[in-house]
Image (cartoon, rainbow, N blue to C red):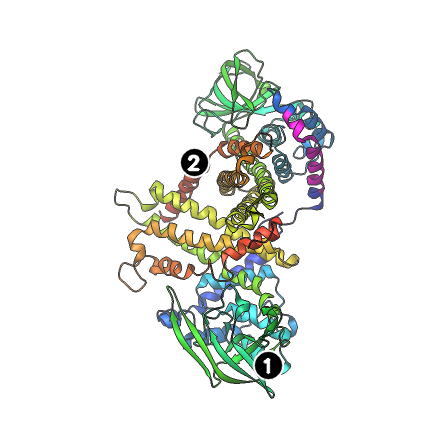
Amino acid sequence: MNIELTPQQKALQQEVREYMKTVMTPELLEEMRNDDLKEGGGPEFRKQYARMGADGWIGLSWSKELGGKELSHMEQYIFTDEVIRSGFAYPFLTTEAVTPVIAANANDEVREEVVGGVKQGKVVIAIGYSEPSAGTDLAALKTRAVKDGDDWIINGQKMWTSLANYADYVWLAARTDPDASKKHKGLTMFLVPTHYEGFSVTPVHTLGVRTNATYYNDIRLPDKYRVGDVNGGWKLITGQLNIERLSLFTHGQVDSLYQETCEWAAATDAPGGGKVIEQAWVQHNLAKVKSGLEIVRLICWKQAWAMDQGPLDMADASMAKVYSSEFFVELYRMLLEVLGTAGTIGADSPGAVLRGRIEFRWRVGSILTFGGGTNEIQRDIIAMAGLWMPRTR
Amino acid sequence: MDFNISDELKSVQQLAQQIIGDFTEVEKLKAIEETQERFDRELWAALAEAGLLGLDIEESHGGMDLGFFSLATLCEEVGRCVAPVPVIPVLVSAAATLRRFGTDSQKDRYLPGIANGSALVGAALEEYGNDDPAAPAATARAIEGGYAVSGTKFAVTNAAAASRILLTARADDDLVMLLVDPKAAGVTLNPQVVTSGETRSELVMDKVQVPVEDVVATGKKAANAAIWALAATRTALAAYALGLCDKMMRMTGQYTSEREQFDRAIATFQAVSHRVADCYIDVECLRLVTQQAASLIDQGRDASDAVLMAKIWCGDVTHRVSQASQHCHGGTGVDRDYPLFRYCLAARQVELSAGSSASLTGELGARIAAQYLAADA
């Protein structure tokens, strides 16, 4: 039992932290003030993403065969944590969740095109799972793919297709067997190039960032863009969920908010004299945040460490998701209370505290308790897999 | 980064589970609870026989010398069975502190007896309204050949059975850590029945003479010893609570899976299963912070923040898991013929001992403020 980064791991952390400072250029920060470009997609984002590819930072966890460095999950987590802390809209779902699945299951031509493109920082892939009537019950999705000669004809609608406004492909789950004995057995995965005729996007503006609805209208897709077996899509979807979560909840992004709030409170005068941080209620909130954050740090490290030892325990993976998503929301609230009414001032208005970052993070953070597998389902899993309790109904 | 438990420690854990499990059958616990002392001396002897009382005592004093982390693991196992043995005051607060801060002759005199189970050394770290042994109100006046100690400590475990009790007192502006003989002239022990059901003692000292050979440390060294003893005790309480809470949660998972209402197991109602799932999350959080604090102490590194956070989580988690377990058990949870009540009472005792979540959150907040104000100056 030794819960600390090794000197090599600390060196990697420092190296990524320094490198990311060169990625977050003033031009990029300016570009990200546009709400539609906060999650990437602008010319400066494209330039820096491609530079990360050229400098060899993309796909560090991939096999050597694919041009990766086979980093451990622990090292991959350190990389992820630092990249997210920097604020760069690095497309983790593309690089860590989807691309390895494509590499393992696509035909040679598409593998070369897509995996090679991601490696160079030229390709971004959006996720096309959810639909207007298929969210938590994902296997109920209705988007159809019908075989027509050597091609597939795709029709349907996807919801919450984040990044689709600039992505190069959508990683699409579609129904290929409407009569399957169980609904999850009739699904197949496809890559849909976003420049194909019949594909369209409309924006959905959320509390925080822009996401999209995407439409698939008689798209004629060559069979080479089918990934994996026909009707074998479900295991490709579920196989990468744990890896996805390891990039949703990281410590650095919230730890930096805590630290900045502490610095602000130590530097700002309180109305009755002294500094804001000298008030008991402020210290109480900061101590609560610190005690909760410590768990986030330990959970992340333990999950990454455990993934290097073997498959992740289901109950522990769900525990990490529920705890982190609910604590993040609490943390935003407790830090905003310290900032007071000024905490509500938006980034571009005069008087904004800490560049309005916490206010913005709260608006983004509320999706995490239901996104990525809603917490009710996660608690069901904990009761069943962790405590052998019977299935709820 | 390594969250692994070594094979050596795993065998210690299994051995402890086996021995403690054998001695904590319900009828046996009930018999011990009938006695005022509430101390299972047969279990204590069995733990000594297996070498488990000497986990954090050097081999030259009859111990196994496996370090503080292994001792915290023993505390967890004792908690899992609410076994009536004073592992925390004797092995953690007293022996582990003496091992690190005592004089050679004190270690020679007291540690072998603790390791082989023949002698007890207790500890009295708390005063009324003050759980910081580095800032006691009790006084020690220098006299020829030692000190005369006056003052009051309370909630002392197994005080009458101990050959010495480790405590601190103020000598003018200095701090002294000493071993007080509970049978010495000037000592009064007043029985105090506490929530856990134990009878503890109020220890009143009126000019009790402590010879120089029982003076553990003075000045800076005594302050370090008191701070260490408190940190180790808080971490051990968290480990003990981890055992308690893990067991309460599993009992509740099992009970709700068997108990039927409306023709179905109540665990199949999400309102019930989610309450138990929340206990699982809490217990895992407590496990993480406790392991971190114990491993830092084990390695002799700065654990001050980690220990505060462990005890804060300990207080919150014992409260939440205990109340959820009682609630989900319905009337069975409060019935003294069902084992859960014992855990709930012990949980409340641990929660309020050596600093509550509220007071320690205040202390942690003050430390954060001091850190950032210093950086800003």
List the residue tagged with mark 1: A110
Q: Main secondary structure of the magenta part?
A: helix
Instruction: Work out whether disc 1 and disc 2 sit on a shared chain.
Output: no
User: Which residue is farthest right?
Assistant: B49
Secondary element type, mark 1: helix
Magenta includes B94? Answer: no
Along the line of sight, the residue nearer the viewer: A20 or A142: A142
CA–CA distance in space, label 1 to label 2: 61 Å
Q: Residues within 10 Å of mark 2 (few under 14, many from 20)?
A: few
Relative image position of residue B42 (x, y in whole percent): 70, 25
Chain to which the residue tagged by mark 2 belongs: B
Residue B359, numbered label: 2
A112 shown above or below A290? below
**Which sits in the foreground, A66 or A23?**
A66
Residue A300 visible in the current orientation? no
For this orientation, the residue located farthest to the front is B263
Question: Percent position (x, y) of residue B147?
Answer: 52, 17
B201 vs A208, left or right, is right
Q: Amino acid at mark 2?
A: Ser
Q: Helix or strand or loop: what does disc 2 sit on? A: helix
Q: Is residue B173 visible?
A: yes
> Residue A361, labelled with which disc?
none
On screen, A45 above or below A76? below
- First to last magenta residue range: B11-30
The relative height of residue A200 versus residue B353 in the rendered view (above or below) is below
| Percent of width and height locating residue A181 | 62, 70
